[in-house]
């Protein structure tokens, strides 16, 4: 991780240095389709293709190969598929596959694809 040091204000002691670490990351979006209609969200698109236009492994691998050497983490972020939708399992498998590809390319993957369960 990268490190930055800075001096903070009164709540942490005047002039006391603090260290913040971070890892440069890249976001891969397998799909913008989402069944939720949150009024605050400008990320989502209406569900229209039932998964036919989701990002493929080849497309994800191409993006991963093109990443800057500074990138350490890959965020897999997607719209949500309804928990009872017929293509829910395929959607979870798509995210898992992209995470595996990220690992294969030397990146630390993490997800933001909505609520999941262990099944």
Image (tube, rainbow, N blue to C red):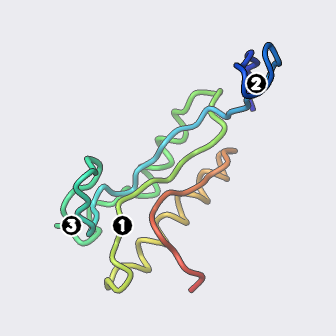
Nearer the observer, 5 or 7: 7
Residue displayed at 80% across by 13% down:
15
Residue 16 in the image: above or below residue 86: above
Label 1: which secondary element = loop
Which quadrant, please, contains the N terminus?
Answer: top right
Residue 13: percent from left, percent from top:
80, 22
Which residue was labeled with disc 3? Answer: 47
Q: How many labels does the image show?
A: 3
98 on left or right of 1: left
Mark 3 is surrounded, within 10 Å at the Cα level, by few (under 14), some (14 to 19) or many (20 or more) other residues, namely some
Q: Do the residues labelled 1 and 3 touch (CB within 8 Å)?
A: no
Q: Which of marks 1 and 3 is nearer the N terminus?
A: 3
Residue 98: percent from left, percent from top:
52, 58
Q: Earlier in the sequence, mark 1 or mark 2?
A: 2
Which residue was labeled with disc 2? Answer: 3
Which quadrant, please, contains the C terminus?
Answer: bottom right
Q: Do the residues labelled 1 and 2 touch (CB within 8 Å)?
A: no
| Residue 110 quadrant | bottom right
Residue 112 in the image: above or below residue 27: below
CA distance for labels 1 and 2: 34 Å
- Mark 2 or mark 3, which is nearer to you? 2
| Residue 74 quadrant | top right
Nearer the observer, 12 or 2: 12
């Amino acid at each position: 991780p990268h490190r930055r040091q800075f001096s903070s204000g009164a709540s942490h002691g005047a002039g006391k240095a603090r260290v913040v670490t971070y890892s440069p990351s890249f976001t891969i979006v397998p799909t913008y389709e989402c069944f939720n209609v949150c009024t605050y969200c400008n990320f989502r698109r209406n569900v229209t293709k039932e998964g036919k236009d989701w990002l493929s492994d080849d497309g994800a691998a191409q993006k991963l190969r093109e990443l800057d050497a500074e990138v350490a983490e890959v965020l897999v972020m997607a719209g949500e598929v309804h928990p009872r939708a017929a293509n829910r399992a395929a959607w979870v498998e798509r995210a898992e596959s992209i995470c595996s590809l990220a690992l294969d390319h030397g990146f630390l993957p993490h997800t933001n694809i909505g609520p999941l369960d262990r099944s």
